């Protein structure tokens, strides 16, 4: 079904920026999941954008109960091609051809509440382990830098596969 809107859930803003960028490219309106209820009807076809938290797609379960999710986009700090989208599609029983991974970033200053504490704890464990590792891949070097100081990889280029899918609908 051709989507008529974008619905997103974001914590630190990377997912919101992707949703807004895709709104510009597609012409679809974009709504925060919390506010979408007053704008959309139950069963409306949407493109859902959510952020990854410990391998879970935030907001997806709620979105799928109300809307018909035509395509999903998962925003994470991992490098594209790291296999997370395959895991997500399998976990939520979603067609991989309509599931897209978008590299977001990490902004310690914008992480709200408990998420900031969780990320700092995570980086305290992952950082030193990665630091010690010999022969780090470029992706691991990127991840290490992100865990130390944060990073922003939001880019229009990452939206190309989703845009190509949308144009075919
Ligand atoms: C507690 C926590 C857990 C996370 N787990 C994952 C993860 O499993 N995979 C991943 O790629 N990114 C993970 N991230 C990184 C976020 O998905 C990334 O920062 C994303 O850009 C956040 O989107 P937002 O700015 O819209 O909230 C995690 C971040 C936090 C704070």
Image (cartoon, rainbow, N blue to C red):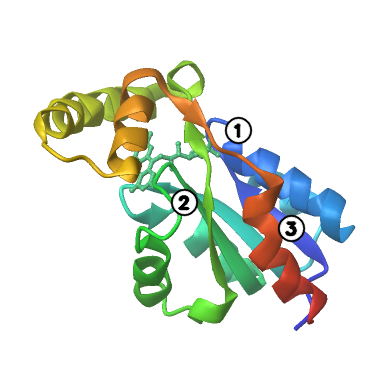
> What residue is rendered at 84% in x and 60% in y?
26
Q: Is mark 2 within 8 Å of ligand 1?
A: yes
Q: Position of residue 8 (x, y in %)?
A: 64, 50
> What residue is rendered at 35% in x and 72% in y?
91
The residue carrying mark 3 is 6
Considering only vertical position in the picture, is 16 above or below 71?
Answer: above
What's the mark number on residue 13? 1
Report how far apart the C-alphas of labels 3 and 1 lie in the structure: 15 Å
Report how far apart the C-alphas of labels 2 and 1 lie in the structure: 13 Å
What's the mark number on residue 58? 2
Image check: 102 left or right of 3?
A: left
Q: Nearer the viewer, residue 162 or 44?
A: 162
Which mark is first along the chain, 1 or 3? Answer: 3
> What residue is rendered at 48% in x and 63% in y?
61
Q: Quadrant of the N terminus?
A: bottom right
Q: Position of residue 11 (x, y in %)?
A: 53, 35
Residue at the outermost front position? 135
């Amino acid at each position: 079904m051709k989507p008529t809107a974008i619905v997103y859930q974001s914590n630190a803003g990377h997912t919101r920026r992707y949703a807004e960028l895709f709104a510009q490219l597609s012409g679809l309106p974009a709504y925060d999941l919390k506010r979408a209820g007053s704008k959309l009807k139950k069963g409306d076809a949407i493109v859902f954008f959510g952020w990854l938290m410990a391998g879970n797609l935030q907001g997806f379960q709620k979105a799928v109960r109300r809307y018909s999710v035509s395509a999903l986009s998962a925003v994470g700090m991992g490098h594209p091609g790291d296999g997370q989208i395959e895991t997500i599609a399998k976990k939520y029983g979603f067609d991989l051809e309509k599931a897209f991974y978008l590299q977001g970033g990490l902004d310690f200053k914008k992480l709200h509440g408990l998420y900031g504490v969780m990320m700092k704890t995570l980086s305290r464990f992952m950082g030193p382990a990665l630091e010690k590792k010999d022969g780090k891949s470029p992706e691991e070097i990127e991840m290490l830098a992100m865990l130390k100081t944060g990073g922003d990889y939001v880019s229009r280029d990452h939206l190309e596969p989703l845009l190509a899918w949308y144009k075919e609908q």
